[in-house]
Image: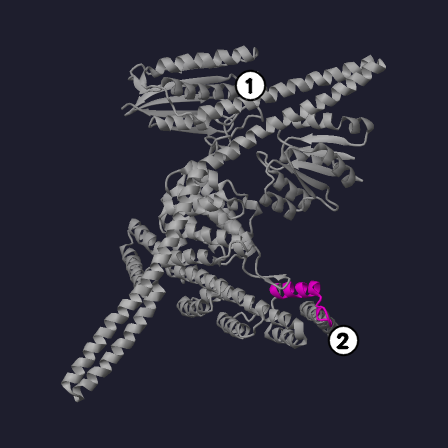
Amino acid sequence: MKILVVDDEIDVQALFEQRFRKEIRSGEFQFAFAFSGEQALDYMKNNHHEAVLILSDINMPGMSGLELLREIKEKYEAPPPVVMMLTAYGDQENHDQAMRLGADDFLTKPVDFNLLKDKLKTKTA
Amino acid sequence: MRKQQTTTCIIFFLIVGLFTYNQKLSAQVSKVDSIFLLLQQSSIPKELDTVKFSKAFDLIANTDLTILEIQRLESVIPQFKGKQKGYGELIKYSIMAGNKYKDYQKSIEYGKKLVEEWTRSNDPDLILLTKSVLSQMRLFYRNSGNVVEGVKYYLQKLQEFKQIKDNKGIEVCYYVLGGFYRYMGLLNQAIFSFKRTLSYIDSSDARPVYFKDIQIGIGGGKVRWYNNNSVIANYYYYDGDYDRSIQYARYNFLNGYGKVSHQTVKALGLAKTFMGDLDSAFYFLNSINISALTTNGKADMYQTMSLFFLKSGNLQRAELYIDSLNVLVEKAKIPTDANTGIIHPDYYLSLIRIEQKRYAEAIRLLERDNIRLFKNRSVLLENYLLLADLYAKVNNHNQSRVNYQKYIQLQNDIRKDQKVFEEAGFEMEMQLAKNEDTINQLEITNKVNAATRNYVVAFAMVLLLLIGMVYFRYRSKQKANQVLEKTIQELRTTQQQLVQSEKMASLGELTAGIAHEIQNPLNFINNFSEINTELLEELETELAKGNIQEAAAITKDITQNEAKINQHGKRADNIVKSMLQHSRSSTGQRELTDINALCDEYLRLAYHGLRAKDKSFNANFELKADNSLPKLMLVQQDIGRVILNLISNAFYAVNEKKKKSSNEYVPSVNVVTRLDQNNVMISVEDNGSGIPESVQQKIFQPFFTTKPAGQGTGLGLSLSYDIIKAHGGNIHMESKEGEGTRFFIYLPTS
């Protein structure tokens, strides 16, 4: 079960690796990290269909998370991977736009990691 | 034998031909068939199958129909009986709204008929639907160029709605009238009408217009309110009243509507552009995600961006946007009168050509624009004037005169109309005018009679009539005044609200920015400290078990996390410090300052500061000082901070490039001072990687940074900008990707 985390904050990698250390150790989850939308697309291209779930920030320099979402949902063959948006801007417009573009879930920062864990488990089950 | 072969061949082709023809025919037939079938199936006894019906409804909207096919569909309507009758009527709406007869006049008649029928129906759903019909019909009036007829019709409707106090109806009428007036070039009336719509919208009602459960036509409540508000902002922009344009658009922007309404962003961006405030224009224009807009919205934003770049002197980018626009117009077949406003790439490209002094091409483009938009007077007015000027430039004085004449003629026409639809409260005025006519007629009749009647009686009559007239005028004027007073009162309240929101604006924008910037490091701090608590518990367990190796691994993680907590704490600290610097009004005293000494000091300071942090760092640097510079009265501390900031950035840039380049690259930073007329110029130049063009416009914005998250607050340059402006100076930059960047500061000598 591979999860691709997309965020421009580099320390997000350390954070996820620590927060999910038990799940990573047991092999339940595997994580990959991209620090921009462009990097995420590259990753998807190079590791064809490996990531089944993408967890993306919205507000990033360059390609935004919403553009990434659109790109993935439009261009990747069926079934497109599950995409969950993770943003500090939890306003209605952002939410609605993400949903219109086909986001599978919408979480706001600060992340409730227990909730996220549950969601990841059900989404990937 | 040969003959037989030929005949077989011909027959074969005939069959093939017939076959393909039949296929084509059946493809079209099957589409109408499927609509027909869906409609029939949806109308099952008891409950209507709304899923099937909606599907059919959508299909009608998207299918080209022949007259026969329309009639076939209309034949299903009687099947919808009793409670379902309304849905049958909805099919009529769909045929009307889609202009299925492809004849504007016919569609107008069709629409008028529906409005009359449904108004009398006593069915609240259908009565509501008349508003959608009225809104839709405006396009037909406009596209057929029959706007004057339209004004008459909607003014009459307006009176009817006012009598029965139907606010939604009144609102739609003002909305349509506003658009018509704009089309006729009567901006004052257009703005007035749109302001009136604001008082009739129930902004607590957020629902779009539904027909039972099927969504159609105009949006509801709050969204509508914001939309109309943004229309007003745009009209003020067209009128050249940029302050008011910004006031109205800003109100939307602050309420979060800017994110979805490109009209709001467009008004803000263009008004700021024409006021010469390019930085904030770019900030607003950039705040919307163009790729997420509808096709028409996208097209409108392309031409807006083009105009912005034209005014910023970046002709290349301006033209790129027109290229994209042309592709889009071609691909999506966008009409000249799209619902977002006039889309005309030719006009915008001509503006670029004018700037490039390619006048002949500009003329060709504008002439073509005139042909496409020959009905739109506000477009023509501007084009004629441009053309007159252009023809003069290419020495075609005859054409120049012709265009001037056209311009003046059109202006006269518009002025005439303006008189017809007098200023604010002009309907009331129109009513007055009508009453006066009646009085005049009476007067004439009486004059005729007077000739045959007793002189005295006639005199008394006229006197009475005069008194009556004066009284009548007085009463009517009083009524008109009451209406005007109420309008003024409403406007005043709105104005007060706007002033208040303007005051809150900068505060709001700032607070949101700070909150978000600080939130990120705080999240990290909280998270890592929570993880450490968990890890410490684990450590205790492992130690109790005597598992030293595992315990050592956990300790390493804890130490690492501790470092992260510290790092993000400092980051938050830095942001707060910079914010304070930003907001603190400068208390520093101005004193006579030697710019050369200041540059020298900070160049060394920056270099050694970086060396202290990073031993591997090295770069050439030089100060080329103009020793004839006069001393300037400056807040030394502030200007010093700006110079330090620019120099540090330059060193950072060359260092980054050095990390990526071969050994041949020699990083260097040069500071130059020079007396340039009445200014002292300071330039800071580096041979780093340069700043991409897409980023150049943003670099003076608060919180904008290209450094990785955590390394820069994004406030340095915006702070510098404020300081230089406070000294009455100027700061700008030039940059080439791959070659380097040069910042220029100009400070006035007196």
What is the distance, in whole Å, between disc 2 and disc 1 at their CAs? 85 Å
The answer to whether residue B721 is magenta is no
Residue at 32% across / 60% down in the picture?
B423
Instruction: Identify the main secondary structure in magenta.
Output: helix
Choose mark 2 or mark 1, whichever is in front.
1
Q: Which residues are magenta?
A: B42-61
- Residue B349 vs B19, above or below: the answer is above
Nearest to N terminus: mark 2 or mark 1: 2
Q: Amino acid at mark 1?
A: Lys
The location of residue A15, given as percent across then percent down, is: 69, 26
- SS at circle 2: helix
Residues B57 and B83: in front is B83
- Which quarter of the figure has residue A6? top right
Q: Horizontal placement of B693 versus A81: left or right?
A: left
The location of residue B377, given as percent across then percent down, is: 37, 60
- SS at circle 1: helix
- Residue A109 vs B745, above or below: the answer is below
